[in-house]
Amino acid sequence: MSAGKTRFDEIYDEPDPRAYFRRLAPLEYEIPHHAQEVFRRDLALRAAAHGPGGPVTVLDLCCSYGINAALLNHHLTLAELYAHYTAPEAEHLSVAELIARDRRFYASRRRADATPVIGLDAARHAVGYALAVGLLDEAYAENLEARPPSEQLRAAMARTGLITVTGGIGYVTHRTFEALLGCAGRPVWVSAFALRTFSYESVCAALAAHGLVTESDPSRAYPQRLFTGPVERDHAIGQTVLAGHDPIGLESAGRYHARLYQSRPAPR
């Protein structure tokens, strides 16, 4: 992770996501909103491409508190999640009370076409929360940059048909994708949003070694969040240029932007 990018370590592994949403609300963190329809569309395409066999299992990489799973499988928007966790009535609940409240909240909004979601993140408390409230079917607090996947995660990955990621590129590298694809038991697609401040080339190469072709529209950028200040802005602009992108009107206007990379098995 770049030294010039503001770190939010204090909010990534809390027992619940209230601090996460309170901290990111003023910065207008929005990339899961843009990913919501992309992931739903790719999930439907992946299901259609490989025929019947039940719902496609999704592995959400760097899943945090299960936000992508919440948006994928429930009649919810990201704005509604911000409102839910920053509302005055949520502020003084114990963690146990919040979990009970959230189990009811998500169950009442569950989509009829909900699909199994496996969560992977190094943050143990965050994935534990997402599992406890029913957002994840399985949760793994593992760091594949540092050690190989557990046998349980290997078995979960063997059932996976789609890997999604919104905020993890830079925290994870090609090593994590190599480890996951090495466990694949069926055709796997990858749908990844990566900040334009990072190069995705090494990940593309790792995916290509496993037979995946990556496509991306260089003209399309997705706003991620506001910069925390001029230091982060200036550093991001410099990193965007080094990565081969033009920051004018995007990072120069005060926000991180991401690019979407979609990887699928090469046609035979």
Image (spheres, grey):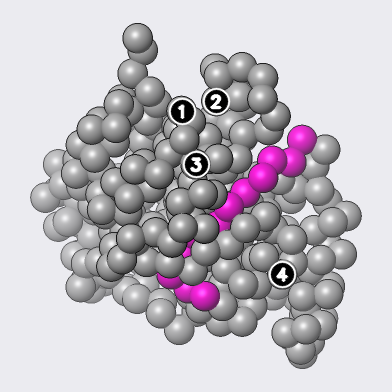
Please name the residue that numbered disc 1 is placed on.
187
User: Visible in this render: residue 2?
Assistant: yes
Whole-angstrom CA distance, mark 1 to mark 4, is 29 Å
Q: Which residue is more in the foreground, 119 or 31?
A: 119
Please name the residue that numbered disc 3 is placed on.
158
First in sequence, mark 3 or 1: give its number: 3
| Cβ–Cβ under 8 Å for marks 1 and 2 | yes
Which residue is located at x 37 percent, y 30 percent?
Answer: 263
Whole-angstrom CA distance, mark 1 to mark 2, is 9 Å
* Numbered circle sitting on residue 132: 4
- Identify the secondary structure beneath mark 2: helix
First in sequence, mark 1 or 2: give its number: 2
Whole-angstrom CA distance, mark 3 to mark 1, is 10 Å
Q: Amino acid at mark 4?
A: Ala
Which residue is located at x 77 percent, y 78 percent?
Answer: 98
Q: Which residue is more in the foreground, 261 or 182?
A: 182
Q: Which residue is more in the foreground, 229 or 116?
A: 116
- Quarter of the figure with the N terminus: bottom left
